[in-house]
Amino acid sequence: MDYDLIVIGSGPGGYVAAIRASQLKMKTAVIEKADIGGVCLNWGCIPTKSLLKSAQVMDYINNAANYGITVEGSVKADFGAVIARSRNVAESMSKGVNFLFKKNNIEHIRGFGRLKGNNTVEVESLEGDKKLLTASNIILATGARSKELPNLIQDGKRIIGYREAMTLGELPASMVIVGSGAIGSEFANFYQVMGTSVTLVEFMPRIVPNEDEEVSKQLERSFRKLKIKVLTSSSVESADTSGEKIKVSIKTPKGIETVETDIVLSAVGVTPNIEDIGLETAGVKVIKSKIEVDEFYRTSAPGVFAIGDIVGGQALAHVASTEGIICVEKIAGLDPEPLDYKNVPACTYTTPEIASCGFTEAAAREAGFNIRVGKFPFTASGKASASGMREGFVKLVFEAEYGELLGAHMIGSNVTEMISEIVVARKLETTAHEIIKAIHPHPTMSEAIMEAAAAAYGEVIHL
């Protein structure tokens, strides 16, 4: 065999799996046709956070008077410089992973990889040349791309996906964003603050529909305060690009509404990249566009594994990375613990931020739990008041009899940095009273976690 392990795809699942494999003394190669780091480092998680930081700085400047600071003269964003900074951040991170590959003796093979029977991968170079490589184990980590709606075909110029939204040549005066999940909501926040007039369209009755209902309501209030036009229970019927402006026909509860806009951003989810990678040839089973795997990511084909957005778990970078580590450790003969998909944190980097983990209040009730719910608003937080970030709250859901922490739902400043406490607490089966009795430093935003737990049991101090 040429290698102990070949990984096809270098996103946060693929490159992490490769590095862990190298640590475990496997001869490893990664096949990647584009930049190392995949969508996350180059076109997703990292560069979007750079854009959102620029928007946050812009918002601080626009509201400097609230902090006793006078900013004289007009303030405007250099949109090109904002985009350039984002691309530089992404490039730097990709170079960092390249360095890690060299450090760990991982071979990067540039090209398109596809399965060619047992233990064999065909690599097609960018020039079209083909060669065969063999490996004892193969991990598929090919990720996903922007999903297209049949009535909203992306042309990459006026009707775009998330990738084009990060590299627009100039700031559009107006934009319709279809889909209010993490991607759609983050871009709505960014562009509105930058100066674009944004209309956010969501098919479900509320935005960020996978979050707790109270979190959704709070984000909608915050978005309306930003003057984002929010249309829920609505769908785009058509988009006419024949004129100078795109005429978007939107079906709303009040009837058809036509919105004229410069750009339409489709943010309705992602589609797994499983085409033309040799799944049929290798005998890899697919169910509903996802590769079927067991708890250690083994496919139906011997020696072939799959992780990340192409399998059934949550389409999140940190999920893919964790799956990659578990998969490789199992291949190496270790005894890794399967991933608990009920204890995966989700983060949305809007202003205010959203972070959640575990059962929502509604889901806990539907599951038959007798629950206690504690909620602490940031309006009662000294740190939030001092920082001028009083929007939002922490909400905790507990099983009533034993105080088991079932879920946490936060919206507010820096809550994406606070959610890890919840993940660890749930992992250790921490109870409400253990959280209440664990000292949280003052003044911090994270005090709200302790206070929310106390609120569930009638012990809250600052509310």
Image (tube, grey):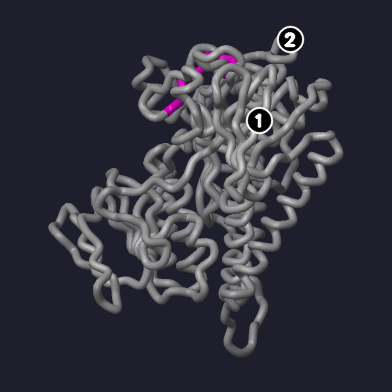
Determine whether 45 is above or below 210 in the image.
below
Residue 296 lies in quadrant: top right
User: How far from the left and from the top, in percent, is residue 176?
Assistant: 34, 63
Residue at left offset 76%, top offset 52%: 95
User: How far from the left and from the top, in percent, is residue 136?
Assistant: 69, 17
Quadrant of the snapshot with the C terminus:
top right
Q: Which three-letter amino acid code belongs to the residue tagged 2?
A: Gly
Name the foreground residue: 140 vs 258.
140
Q: Nearer the viewer, mark 1 or mark 2?
A: 1
User: How far from the left and from the top, in percent, is residue 283?
Assistant: 47, 17
Q: Which residue is mark 2?
A: 333
Chief secondary structure of the magenta span? loop
Report the span colored magenta: 290-297
The residue furthest left is 255
Name the foreground residue: 392 vs 250.
250
Q: Which residue is mark 1?
A: 7
Residue 142 lies in quadrant: top right
Q: Which three-letter amino acid code belongs to the residue tagged 1?
A: Val
